[in-house]
């Protein structure tokens, strides 16, 4: 799976978990400052990634990602 | 009868099923055995059946005290997966769930979510972080709450508050710098915890260095906003503030400083700190100067009771925490 394909899927999943429009999101979107997310949403996102992309992520590693781009890097490493 | 003796008595009246994913750990098995054989809980040891049975024999325990769940039993695992994935709030699908269930801690939590156990007790080999993260992934955070957190129960000699020498305090352990929404979650969860454990009618004060606007600034704004959010989310609970600590727990001070109706001022039985700096210092003050016994931290905010323990805890402390978590689980079913 190419990085772009992963990114497209992750953007959709972030939009769903954080209740945002995909058009509002990009690689540089920050989980903390732009999405202002609580851990509940990160749990939903990690579950979704594990279900759909067939990788195992540590919640702690995912929570440490600053931006969506960092999260895609993490998924690529785990694949 | 001390509070902890009362809690032990209560546990005996309705023993709960406690799953132990660190069953092979010597201290953990001893604590589970004592709590089980004395009738406080029904211990379930989760792991490799042959290894567990060998350890029970070697340590001279009676096997019939325990229920043993073999993590290699594929039929049982499949039954758990089916039950878990059928739950309305679960997010993990079969493949991702099975991968996570390779880990005994998460296996035990799946059992708990699927109502095969009432409590998961761990934290002697696993770290607190492992338990918190697994709890969030498998058991989940209670709807409406923004964070998990903890409270402690202090038994303070010479203190004569609205619950005698007892006072519940939070969060002194988990949530470092809560925002207003998270602070509201801590207050709400704390009320639910003391209700389930102690049958108290919670009166919860969010404390600060100001009482009802006597001071001003962003540190206070966070607390007043939290009270507002908590009251909107749970109008059934008595959560009030911002109060200074003395106005929260001392009726004479409250009468002077709180010039409005309050179900909480002067008679709070739950005190919520604005952040972990205050929380940690406060619990040390209560212990050092007040010579109090502090029980906990009890984790809260999960859909079901998840309990962590100190990795250096002696067997007696483990047993106390196991029994407390079992009583909470029984209380939450009511």
Image: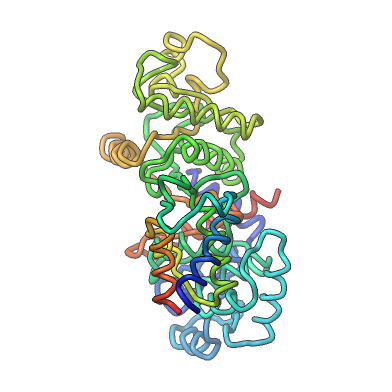
**Rendering colour mode:** rainbow
Image x and y of residue B6, in percent: 55, 47
Q: Which of B195/B163 is in front?
A: B195
Residue at image x 48%, y 48%? A37
Q: Which of B8/B274 is in front?
A: B274
Q: Can residue B33 be seen in this view?
A: no
Above or below for A1 versus B123: below
Q: Please state if B259 lies on the left or on the right of B245 as rendered.
A: right
User: Which quadrant of the structure image shows residue B200?
Assistant: top right
Where's the C terminus of chain A, which quadrant?
bottom left
Image x and y of residue B90, in percent: 65, 63
User: Which quadrant of the structure image shows residue B314?
Assistant: bottom left
Q: How many marks?
A: 0
Image x and y of residue B112, in percent: 62, 66
Residue at image x 37%, y 30%? B158
Image x and y of residue B207, in percent: 41, 27
């Amino acid at each position: 799976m190419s990085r772009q394909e992963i990114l497209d899927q992750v953007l959709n999943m972030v939009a769903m978990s954080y209740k945002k429009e995909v058009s509002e999101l990009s690689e540089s979107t920050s989980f903390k400052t732009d999405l202002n997310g609580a851990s509940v949403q990160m749990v939903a996102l990690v579950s979704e990634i594990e279900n759909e992309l067939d990788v195992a992520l540590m919640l702690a590693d995912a929570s440490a990602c600053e931006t969506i781009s960092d999260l895609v890097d993490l998924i690529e490493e785990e694949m | 009868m001390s509070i902890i003796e009362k809690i032990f008595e209560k546990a005996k009246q309705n023993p709960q099923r406690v799953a132990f994913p660190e069953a092979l750990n010597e201290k953990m098995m001893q604590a589970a055995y004592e709590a089980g054989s004395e009738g406080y809980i029904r211990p379930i040891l989760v792991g490799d059946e042959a290894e567990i049975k060998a350890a029970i024999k070697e340590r001279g325990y009676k096997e019939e005290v325990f229920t043993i769940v073999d993590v290699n039993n594929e039929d049982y695992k499949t039954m758990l997966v089916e039950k878990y994935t059928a739950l309305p709030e679960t997010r993990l699908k079969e493949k991702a769930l099975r991968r996570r269930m390779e880990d005994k801690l998460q296996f035990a939590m799946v059992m708990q979510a699927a109502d095969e156990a009432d409590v998961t007790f761990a934290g002697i080999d696993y770290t607190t972080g492992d338990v918190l993260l697994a709890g969030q992934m498998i058991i989940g955070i209670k709807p409406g709450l923004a964070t998990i957190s903890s409270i402690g129960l202090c038994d303070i000699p010479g203190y004569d508050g609205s619950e005698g020498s007892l006072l519940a305090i939070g969060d002194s352990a988990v949530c470092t710098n809560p925002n207003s929404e998270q602070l509201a979650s801590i207050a709400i969860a704390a009320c639910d915890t003391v209700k389930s454990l102690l049958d108290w009618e919670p009166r919860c004060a969010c404390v600060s260095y100001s009482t009802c606007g006597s001071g001003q600034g962003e540190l206070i704004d966070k607390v007043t906003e939290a009270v507002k959010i908590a009251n909107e989310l749970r109008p059934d609970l008595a959560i009030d503030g911002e109060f200074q600590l003395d106005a929260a727990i001392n009726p004479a001070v409250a009468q002077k400083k709180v010039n409005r109706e309050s179900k909480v001022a002067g008679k709070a039985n739950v005190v919520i700190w604005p952040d972990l700096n205050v929380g940690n210092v406060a619990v040390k003050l209560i212990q050092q100067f007040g010579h109090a016994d502090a029980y906990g931290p009890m984790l809260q905010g999960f859909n079901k009771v998840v309990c962590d323990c100190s990795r250096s805890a002696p067997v007696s402390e483990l047993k106390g925490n196991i029994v407390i978590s079992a009583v909470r689980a029984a209380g939450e079913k009511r």
